[in-house]
Amino acid sequence: MAKRKDSSKKKRKGSGNGLLIAAVLLTILFLAGVMSLGALYYLEKNKEKSQTIPPKITEAAAVVTQTEEQTKESDNKNTGEDSQGESVLEKQSEETSESESELEMSSESESQTKEDESESEEESTEEESTESEEVREAKEAVLEKYKNLGMITGVRNYLNMRKGPSTDYEICGVIFKNCAVEILEEKDGWMKIESGGATGYVSAEYVTTGEKARKLALSSMKYMAEILTDSVDALYEPNEGADVITTFLKGERYDINGETKDWVEIEAVTELSGYVKRETVYTGYFLDEAIYFSLDGVSETRQDLIRKAFEYYGGTYVWGGKQLTAEGGVDCSGYTMCLYKLFGVQLPEFSGAQAEVGMTVDEDTIRPGDLIFYVGRYPGVIGHVAIYIGNGKIIHAASESKGICVSSWKYGPPVIMKNVMGD
């Protein structure tokens, strides 16, 4: 009995050892597998890390980059570039150019009238260089008549002459741009001047003196004919027996359209030349002068009408034109029709029809603001109308060559004179 028990104990002991060995082997295998997986994971992890910059290196690189950018920015400021890559020097250049441009624009706006004077001076220089010695001497002789020459500048159309050195004084005449004056005295911003037989006062700011006045005068002179005898007949043809167009009076001046040995062709009536004997006129150079007239005793409405008429002085003559603007655009009857309409007077379109309106006046009763009608191109037919401004002068849309201008009221024989104002 004892031997069996020992045998069974040996069997149980042997099976227990086998289980232990198996457990050990399984543990070893498990650990080996874990180690293999760990090795594979480590290798794969190292492979990823080799393609990625470590954080510390990235931070260091960022510091270096920032330092370089700061250095570049500092250098760029010294070389004229801002952080956006735009040149500061270019900006400054543009700002300077803009400032200069604004300065030029300001200079232009403040010196518009002076540009014309500069151009006139340049033209004067060019003319002096191309003119013959005879012409230059003739022009210089004109200037010798003035002791203290002045030239009217800086006005668009005209400048009022007054009886005293203030705008409170009455107007005694008008004077136009580039007209010549004799300066008599200057006081408190006003000049007493003499021009065209008229004496009056104008603001000194509109009078150019000295060398500039001399140059402007030389460039502004016109070659004209002045009537020498009491009356001169202007003929249709340069022949003694030709028909008479009109009669000119002593002292009147006219543009010259042509000359021969015995005859001088001058503009007689609107767009119509007349011929006068050479011995009856003086041909030479003249400067424009003031126009004297008096509005004493004339109603305010008539005075306003005359002043309004001068606002269009120098405007363009357009045959058939009825658009009254500062630039012109009217013929003779268009000028009167549009102007008088502003003062409540309705006139027909054509000069012949206008001559039938209003009350007839004569040389003794005519007043500034009345209309004077003349023969036009065709003998015996009214073809021209003008506004009487006083002192033997008219303002009218004369012709394409003269535009709206002032003339002697007897530049042609008046056919009829009318008061259309109703006063």
Image (cartoon, rainbow, N blue to C red):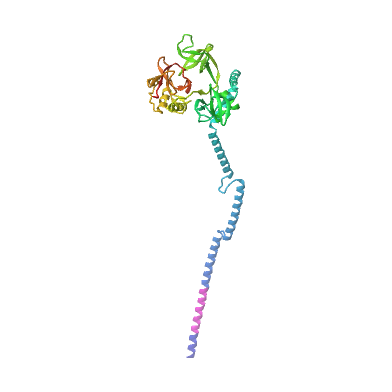
Residue 243 shown in magenta: no
In the rendered view, would you say 269 is above or below 159?
above
Q: Is residue 401 visible?
A: no
Given residues 350 and 180, the one toward you in this image is: 180
In the rendered view, would you say 146 is above or below 38?
above
Residue that lies at the very extreme toward the front in this rendered image: 297
Counting the numbered discs, the total is 0
Q: Horizontal placement of 146 versus 299: left or right?
A: right
Residue that lies at the very extreme toward the top in this rendered image: 241
Q: Where is residue 236 in the image (x, y as percent from the top left)?
A: 46, 13
Q: Position of residue 421 (x, y in %)?
A: 40, 24
Residue 18 shown in magenta: yes
Q: Horizontal placement of 340 versus 211: left or right?
A: left
Which residues, given as a range, are shown in magenta?
10-27
**Principal secondary structure, stretch drawn in magenta:** helix
Residue 142 picture quarter:
top right
Q: Where is residue 90 in the image (x, y as percent from the top left)?
A: 57, 42
Q: Can residue 418 be seen in this view?
A: yes
Given residues 123 and 205, the one toward you in this image is: 205
Q: Position of residue 423 (x, y in %)?
A: 40, 24
Given residues 71 and 200, the one toward you in this image is: 200
Q: Residue drawn at (61%, 46%), measured in percent from left and top?
A: 79
